[in-house]
Image (cartoon, helix red, strand yellow):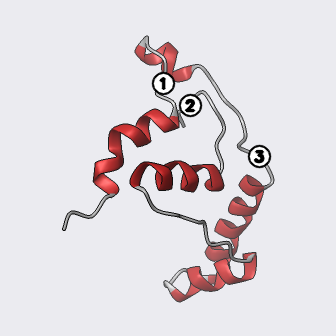
């Protein structure tokens, strides 16, 4: 997994994209049980669904909160910040009348 130069959460992602496209975007939080039920509804076996939920809960608790310099090492250039990516991509998230 390549990781950028800043840890960023769903609230920040939603706010950044929302600002770029002129809309309010809010993450919709659901409980672990609701998430497992969605996975099962989509056809995943119960054990697989619970495994994915456990992974999501670990990530939410911070197990993946880290930054690295891997992009810089592999490409020789600094990774784009998320706000730079959003600014460059905003037109892709805007409906054209």
The reply to whether dot 2 and dot 3 touch (C-beta < 8 Å) is no
Q: Which residue is mark 2?
A: 4
Q: Which residue is mark 1?
A: 79
Residue 67 % position (x, y):
66, 29
* Image quarter of residue 3: top right
The reply to whether dot 2 and dot 1 touch (C-beta < 8 Å) is yes
Q: Which residue is mark 3?
A: 63
Is 52 in front, or is 65? 65
Q: Tag 1 or tag 3, which sits nearer the N-term?
A: 3
Mark 1, residues whose alpha carbon is within 10 Å: few (<14), some, or many (≥20)? some
- Helix, strand, or loop for circle 3? loop
Residue 51 % position (x, y):
68, 68
- Helix, strand, or loop for circle 2? loop
Residue 30 vertical placement versus 4 (above, below): below
Mark 2, residues whose alpha carbon is within 10 Å: few (<14), some, or many (≥20)? some
- For residue 97, side relative to residue 21 (left or right): left
Is 74 in front, or is 8? 8
Q: Tag 3 or tag 2, which sits nearer the N-term?
A: 2
- Helix, strand, or loop for circle 1? loop
Is 25 in front, or is 75? 25
Q: Residue furthest left?
A: 97
In three-dimensional space, the C-alpha distance between marks 2 and 1, rounded to whole angstroms, equals 6 Å
Residue 1 % position (x, y):
54, 37
In three-dimensional space, the C-alpha distance between marks 2 and 3, rounded to whole angstroms, equals 16 Å
Residue 23 % position (x, y):
46, 62
Q: Tag 1 or tag 2, which sits nearer the N-term?
A: 2
- For residue 57, side relative to residue 46 (left or right): right
The reply to whether dot 3 and dot 1 touch (C-beta < 8 Å) is no
The numbered dot on residue 89 is: none
């Amino acid at each position: 997994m390549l990781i950028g130069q800043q840890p960023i959460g769903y609230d920040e992602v939603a706010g950044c994209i929302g600002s770029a496209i002129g809309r309010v975007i809010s993450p919709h939080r659901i409980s672990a049980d609701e998430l497992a039920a969605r996975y099962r509804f989509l056809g995943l076996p119960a054990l697989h669904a619970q495994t994915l939920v456990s992974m999501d809960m670990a990530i939410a608790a911070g197990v993946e909160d880290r930054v690295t310099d891997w992009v810089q090492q592999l490409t020789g250039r600094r990774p784009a910040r998320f706000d730079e990516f959003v600014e460059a991509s905003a037109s892709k998230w805007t409906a054209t009348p």
